[in-house]
Image: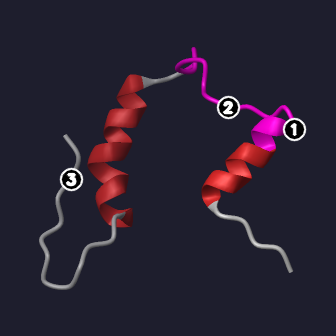
Amino acid sequence: MITYGKTNIWLLLKAMGFTVQRPTGRASQRNEESIRQWRLKRWPMLKKSLPGEESHSLP
């Protein structure tokens, strides 16, 4: 069995012609108000916190 580290995998993929994929920008359909509402209402319900730790919401 052959094992590779993260650096070696990247070097192998680069040698085969693969490149890092990055987003080109924000979606044109992005709705800032919907995102804000989700952060205020839904995110706190989904966010896991450690026992005894207060829950904090995003700004």
Residue at image point 29% right, 59% down: 44
Image coords of residue 19 (percent x, y): 73, 31
Q: CA distance from mark 3 to mark 2?
A: 30 Å
Residue at image point 13% right, 83% down: 52
Residue at image point 38% right, 44% down: 38
Of marks 2 and 1, which one's residue comes earlier in the chain? 1
Amino acid on which disc 2 is placed: Gln
Amino acid on which disc 3 is placed: Ser
Which sits in the foreground, 13 or 49? Answer: 13
Which sits in the foreground, 6 or 38? Answer: 6
Q: CA distance from mark 2 to mark 1?
A: 15 Å
Image coords of residue 3 (percent x, y): 76, 72
> Which image quadrant for residue 47?
bottom left
For label 1, the SS is loop
Where is 18 relative to 39, above or below? above
Question: What span is colored magenta in the figure?
Answer: 13-29
Image coords of residue 49 (percent x, y): 26, 73
Where is 51 relative to 49, above or below? below
Residue 18 is covered by the magenta coloring? yes
For label 3, the SS is loop
Cβ–Cβ under 8 Å for marks 3 and 1: no
Residue 27 is covered by the magenta coloring? yes
Where is 50 relative to 40, above or below? below
Cβ–Cβ under 8 Å for marks 3 and 2: no
What residue is shown with label 3?
A: 57
What residue is shown with label 2?
A: 21
Of marks 3 and 2, which one's residue comes earlier in the chain? 2
Amino acid on which disc 1 is placed: Met
Nearer the viewer's eye, disc 3 or disc 1?
A: 1
Q: CA distance from mark 3 to mark 1?
A: 43 Å
Compared across the picture, whether 29 is left or right of 43 comes to right
What residue is shown with label 1?
A: 16
